[in-house]
Amino acid sequence: MDNLTHTLTALAISQAGLNRKTRFATLALVIAGNIPDVDIVTAFVSSARYLQDHRGVTHSILGATLLAGMVAGGIYAWGRRAPPPQKKTTPPLNLGWLAFCCWVGAASHVLLDLTNAYGVRLLEPFSGRWFAWDIVSIVDPLLLIILTVGLSAPLLFRIISEEVGARKPGFEKGAIVALCGMAALWGLRGFAHTRVVSAFPSTANPFQWTGVAETESAIHIIPVNALDSDIDMERDRIFHKPEPSPALTIAMKIPTAEVFLDFARFPWAEVEDSGDGYDVKILDLRFLSPFPGHQPFTVEIQLAKNLQVLSESFSFIAKGD
């Protein structure tokens, strides 16, 4: 998921009650709720290296637990030297509760990432197997709205209460409503997913999915609605698998392509003769864009006529032709 969703989730968990258990609970939850994405440092090497390492060991059960412990230790060491709190109601610094908050924050990050089509490698470093629930998009507007409304509504009520001289409400109920709304959305999408097996969610509509069916000769991309009893096959997009060729064989053995193929669930390749060489493009059809020429998660390889590799690249972000 995007880091805004991770941060809002951490804030909701804090306001739901953990912020009353120890000082710096909110800080711990927000940092730990984003710390698994520390693997972004590998992007400075290359996009392919980031693809290879992203949602790997830092998103595993063991890795997230170790990262949570490091965050807890760092905040506790800093917190012991921090000035005393100005509010008398602020709870004292408690290492046990602080460690628990950090673990919950890191666990929430892994759980959120588990729900989308990208997935996580929970068992790293012992196994590179991918796990994915496939029920929400990497960026889910509905989930963001639920979290934002749940966390901001109490603030509005506090402003109103201050104007009329009433007692200011807390943030706990709004946070609990937000977390319950998140669970309800997961339940709704999970139910819809049981009706459309081998499908990936749309960005907004919880009942609209993209079905993927693979045969020996092609991969079919079919829009499906969980509420419909029939599938409109006229909207079927067919991606025929390429014929075996020396250019394709060479391209598939290039390091960038091997990393991508380890990640992709529905890889599809095309080979074009450019006249003075070959252009090979490899896609993961679970992330197929409806806009031609703007396809994310793409490997592009250029070969000379003698099959020498001229260039290789991977892109997370959609590019225009």
Image (cartoon, rainbow, N blue to C red):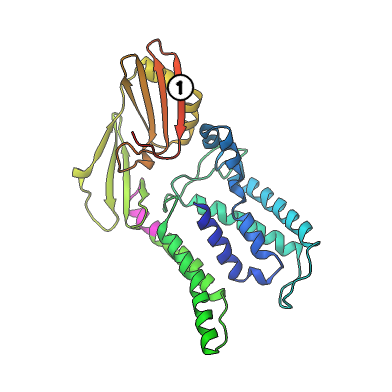
Locate residue 76, reporting x and y percent.
76, 59
Which is nearer the eye, 88 or 132? 88
Residue pushed farthest front?
Answer: 163
Q: Main secondary structure of the magenta part?
A: helix
User: Residue at coordinates 44% horizontally, 13% vertically from top-left?
Assistant: 308
Which is nearer the eye, 53 or 38? 38
Secondary structure beneath label 1: strand
Residue 269 lies in the magenta stretch: no
User: Residue at coordinates 78% horizontally, 70% vertically from top-left?
Assistant: 84
Q: Which residue is mark 1?
A: 311
Residue 108: quadrant of the picture: bottom right
Horizontal placement of 302 versus 87: left or right?
left
User: Residue at coordinates 75% horizontally, 54% vertically from top-left?
Assistant: 73
Relative vertical location of residue 69 with respect to residue 52 in this rendering, above or below = below
Relative vertical location of residue 296 with respect to residue 174 in this rendering, above or below = above
Residue pushed farthest left?
Answer: 234
Locate residue 222, reporting x and y percent.
27, 44
Which is nearer the eye, 315 or 142? 315
User: Residue at coordinates 34% horizontally, 19% vertically from top-left?
Assistant: 244
| Tally of numbered tags | 1
Relative vertical location of residue 84 with respect to residue 40 in this rendering, above or below = below
- Please state, as top left, top right, bottom left or bottom right, where the C terminus lies in the image: top left
Horizontal placement of 59 versus 280: left or right?
right
Residue 190 lies in the magenta stretch: yes
Residue 243: quadrant of the picture: top left
Residue pushed farthest right?
Answer: 81
Tell me which segment is drawn in magenta: 189-198
Relative vertical location of residue 319 with respect to residue 179 in this rendering, above or below = above
Locate residue 292, reporting x and y percent.
29, 38
Q: Amino acid at mark 1?
A: Ser
